[in-house]
Image: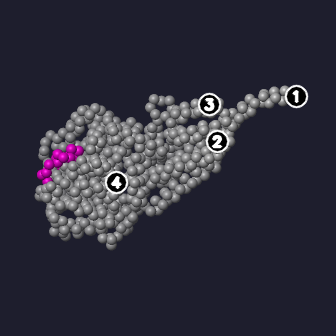
Amino acid sequence: MLWIQQKYKFERMPLKLTFAFCLNMKKILFSFFRQFLFWLLFFNLTRLIFVLYYLKIILIEKISFWEITGIFWHSLKLDLATTCYIMVIPFVMLVIQSVWSPKWMNMINKVYAGFVIAVYSLSAAGEMGIYAEWKTKLTYKVVKYLSQPGEIYNSAETGTFYFLIFLFLLISAGSIYLYIRYFYLHLEHLRRNSWFTLFFFLLTPGFLLVGLRGGFQQIPINQSESYYSDHNILNIAAVNNAFNLYISIFENLQNFDHNPYVFMDQATAAQLMKEVYHTTGDSTLHILKTSRPNIVLIILESWSADLIASLGGKPGITPEFEKLQRNGILFDQVYASGSRSEQGMASLFGGFPGHPVSSITVQPDKFVKLPSLVKDLKNNGYSSSFYFGGQLIYGNIKSYIIFNGFEKIMEGYDFPESLPRGKLGIHDEFTLDYMVNDLGSLKQPFFSALFTVSTHSPWDQPFEKPLKWGDNEREYINAAYYTDHCLGEYFAKARTKPWYPNTLFIIVADHSHNSYRNWHPQTKEYHKIPLMFYGDVLKEEFRGTVWNKLGNQHDLPATLLCQLGLQASKFPFSKDLFNPAVPEFAYYSTEDGVGWIRPHGYFTYDKTTDFYYWWTDPNLPDSIKQEGKAYLQTVFGEYMSK
């Protein structure tokens, strides 16, 4: 009897081991794939919230329902890859738990998941906040701005800011609850089984590796996998936030030691640049009555050419600008090389084009090597001043302005406290009025610059909003209407000042902005900006003319210095727009590529997707493509070498 019991017990052992093996395998695998499923659903939840948040814009663009739903299909591969990255740590914990499963191991998993959920939710809310302004995803450049949270708060409408904070908290808390309540499988006191541990340890990494690479193809998956629509907002929604941010940071870290925009050998690029800038003669048209006028530079925050009827925009937005144009010189083919204010400053004062990835003004060790229009003017007897109603710390503009040698710098807190101000700073009418009164105290000739603030969100200007159209950009065009009104009052008062007859006014935008036409961010129309010369110092025959020379705002230093009879050779990227012999071209940077415009056509190229956006003749010569790439390669190479 005893022998029979012992034999029965012995024969049951394999069954117990088999049962334990199956039970462990079921719990471990079930836990792994439930967590995996959660992340896929979580990504799509944030994506759905983004779509609902910007549903008005989507409806304005008249996107079909089926094309919108394509977001969720085309995002799948990138979501799978991102999930595989996230699941590396849970996999390691599950391997440990398959042989040793104390209760506290579950808490580690929950804390890790909660942290990732919170960070991703923050990126999702942040992306909803920036898309309206920048039309891009959260990138390395955007994250760098997080070092100035006060400026982020001031730049956003109060209601929007707090709503996004609420949304972040809601997404985070709700998702963490759902994860713990419905997706996380609590593991404790599992039976140890070395065979299963070995099985799980050997096979799962292969699954994760294939997943995070996006398959067995030679080239790993990238953001281009989720690009599928002509509507930029759908592509933005489809690309996984975490994956995109990781690539952006990774690429920037790599850029510290090499140029990511090398498309050809340096000798070829240098030769192409030489040909692009080759000028057959020095035949500058002198438009001024005097060689040493006072110069007032008014930098318009975020002004698109679509705000101005003379540049093809709808009438009624900027009527005062139109009045000025009747006696000024308007450039109708000028483009912003960058999309940020600090890039615009480097273009206007340093003649340095904007470029992807970063801005030269945020790095003092680099911008100190730039030439300076302000210093050149100072060396020729000019006094100088700079006025801005906000805080210049944003984008490190203040240190760059100081480097340029402005003798008087006025920002928000330097103005009298009695001046009315909004969330972002002192309203334009008050800074313009302060400047027009203050210029009389400067030694002539003077160079004075003012940077407006009211055409930047949160659009809280103390003025009526008479424009009832514009859809998603109604607030923007009404802010432009306000700043334009302020310009009218400014010039009415300036004409009464004794320094006015000998003053050249230059009105230009720092960069463009999305307009009521909702151009694709890759198009040249999206980057087109106003540039106008105005004042009694203009020769009569040039007043009221339109100058249709292709150029950028970084052409301003050379154009201005040549009018003053001064050398502009220090500004290699700047060309004289009043020289008929200067070749016609314009350049602009995108998030990861280049836009290149010639009189007979243009294109944009995106390095991330290795894709050419042909917006004109698809048979554009290959030589034009090479020019654009050489330009970006050279600009970024110069940036890195500074």
Tell which tag, 2 or 1, sits nearer the viewer: 1
User: At numbered mark 2, what does the secondary structure look like: helix, strand or loop?
Assistant: loop
How much space separates mark 3 and mark 4, taking CA atoms? Answer: 52 Å
Residue depicted at x 65% and y 30%: 195
| Mark earlier in primary sequence (3, 1) | 1
Q: Do the numbered discs 4 and 2 sit on residues whose CB atoms are within 8 Å?
A: no
Magenta stretch: give its range.
564-580
Mark 4 falls on what kind of element? helix
The reply, left or right, for residue 409 in relation to residue 288 is right
The residue that label 4 is drawn on is 395
Left or right for 147, reference 380: right
Instruction: Answer above or below: position of 168 versus 353.
Output: below
Residue position for label 2: 101
Q: Are marks 4 and 1 in contact (CB under 8 Å)?
A: no
Quadrant location of the C terminus in the rendered image: top left
Q: Earlier in the sequence, mark 4 or mark 2?
A: 2
Task: Say which of marks 2 and 3 sits in front.
Answer: 2
